[in-house]
Amino acid sequence: MALMITDECINCDVCEPECPNDAISMGEEYYEIEHSKCTECVGHFDEPQCVQICPVACIPVNPAHVEDRETLMQKYLRLQSQAPASS
């Protein structure tokens, strides 16, 4: 279930650095989440970090990209295999 940021976003800048997958970036008007990178923090944390820190609760599940936990874990594993190796 990839998440999305609604137009209620106040551009407070707190969610972007919390995303372990770098799925959050500034869009034309407010922050956006790239659904192909969003794992709802599966593989990293027990809860989505952006949801936990958002002061206006504007990050619901994206109904166009509903995924179960197993699918999110597979996405996490794929993203990890594509990540550059740290030195």
Image: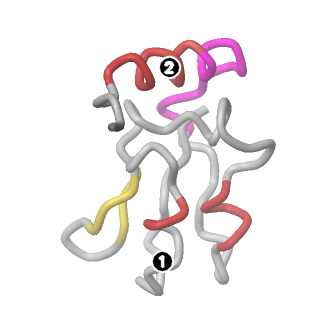
Residue furthest left in the image:
28
Q: Which residues are magenta?
A: 63-73
Q: Position of residue 63 (x, y in %)?
A: 56, 37
Q: Point out residue 17 in the picture as x, y percentages from the top left corner.
A: 46, 67
Q: Quadrant of residue 37?
A: top left
**Residue lying at 72% horizontally and 21% vertically, measured from the top left:** 69
Instruction: Give the crowd class for mark 1: few <14, some 14-19, many >=20 residues within 10 Å.
Output: some
Q: Where's residue 18, x and y in %?
A: 54, 63
Screen quadrant of the C terminus: top left
> Residue at 44% across / 66% down in the picture?
16
At which x and y percent is residue 75? Answer: 50, 19
CA–CA distance between discs 2 and 1?
26 Å
Out of 37 and 4, give the one closest to the viewer. Answer: 37
Type of amino acid under label 1: Cys
Q: Nearer the viewer, residue 30 or 83?
A: 83
**Does the magenta segment cover residue 80?**
no
Pointer 1 residue: 9
Q: Secondary structure at mark 2?
A: helix
> What label sits on residue 75 in the rendered view?
2
